[in-house]
Amino acid sequence: MAHERVRSGVALSEFALIERLRRRLAAARDDVALGIGDDAALLNVPPGQQLVACTDTMVEGVHFLPGAPPSDLGWKALAVNLSDLAAMGGAPAWALLALTLPNDDAGFIERFADGFGELAHRHGVALVGGDTTQGPLAVTVTALGLVPHARALPRAGARAGDAVFVTGTLGAGAGALTLVRRGQTPGPALAERMRRPVPRLAAGLALRGLASACIDVSDGLLADLGHICTASGVGAEVDADALPVLDALRAAFDADDCRSLALAGGDDYELCFTVPAERAGGVARAFAGLDVAATRIGRIVAGAGVRALDSSGALVKVPHPGWEHFQ
Ligand code: ADP
Ligand code: MG
């Protein structure tokens, strides 16, 4: 925006910053007719495909700790968006990046591009545009992907009797943050999950035509499975003792805290999905060639709301139900 150039310190180097990002992140793709450098990007959506679009903002002090390594920030800002694409069964293609920076720190940009680029290149994602402004550190990524017509995985398709699954493990990212807040240093396995969550893109693709509903777990399992239930007009029961967690989480927390982190911690970026019971056996086959497992953790029931039960069938109470802004 032109008035920023007159007023702000980013002013003089705004175009140099954009050029660095373009050089590092504007990966070649045949379907980018026009990328960074014009007023807007032109992207070719193949016939028979639908565009899947999502955006997520990360604000310093809200979504990441002040002083977090810029490369981790770059990775995570893209990862949380690719996780949303994964939850829709989308294949990622393009991204836009709105960066608000306190100053024109070239070192920050290079390290940010290291992390963003590492994940973007892994999935063939091209940066095709964005915006650069000066202000308190905040990163907004818009991710665009493709899914064949009518093959996406919306939240609204769960039915009573469906089995509920989750990919990977739960609670590690929130566990790492809890330790940091206590002034402790999380071990590498937990820290990695907080700094560099892995979007479950291959799992999302494998679930096309198999899952009846899907969501990514960002606010906590109970809250996010609750969104599936609300959208589908059903309820759910979760077997709290069947939740997959890392050994490192069990080692760092007692059993109750471990369970609470897995149920409600958030920042997991795993996929929670439902499958009609008669097709539940297909999940193991669908995940056979993937580098992540899926665990059956409960069932969809008639009614409303999500209840967590222990192995004796008793209701499990969770101290904090999930993350929500403006509360
Ligand atoms: P305009 O004033 O027309 O919005 P800008 O000066 O903001 O244009 O941006 C110029 C070009 O650089 C555009 O193609 C825009 O998409 C791209 N761009 C700006 N900031 C970023 C960024 N942080 N990451 C990627 N592309 C960017
Ligand atoms: Mg602009």
Image (cartoon, rainbow, N blue to C red):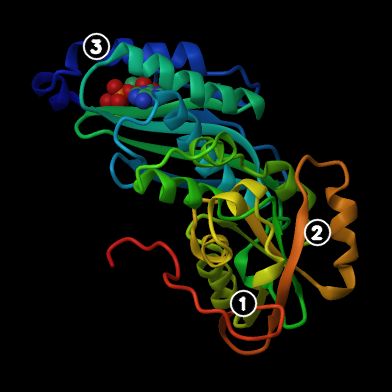
Q: Residues within 10 Å of mark 1 (few under 14, many from 20)?
A: many
The quadrant of the image that shows the C terminus is: bottom left
Indicate which quadrant contains ligand 1. top left
From mark 3 to mark 1, how far is it between C-alphas?
49 Å
For residue 281, above or below residue 33: below
Front residue of 323/122: it is: 323
Q: Position of residue 251 (x, y in %)?
A: 60, 50
Which residue position holds label 2?
Answer: 209
Which residue position holds label 3?
Answer: 13
Cβ of mark 3 under 8 Å from ligand 1: the answer is no
Q: Residues within 10 Å of mark 2 (few under 14, many from 20)?
A: few
Q: Position of residue 101 (x, y in %)?
A: 26, 27
Which residue position holds label 1?
Answer: 232
For residue 261, above or below residue 120: below
Which numbered disc flags the more N-terminal residue, 3 or 1?
3
Front residue of 167/172: it is: 172
Q: Please tell me which residue is depicted at 31% across the width and 12% down the height of the picture.
A: 106
Q: Please tell me which residue is depicted at 49% across the width and 14% down the height of the picture.
A: 24
Q: Is residue 268 left or right of residue 163?
A: left
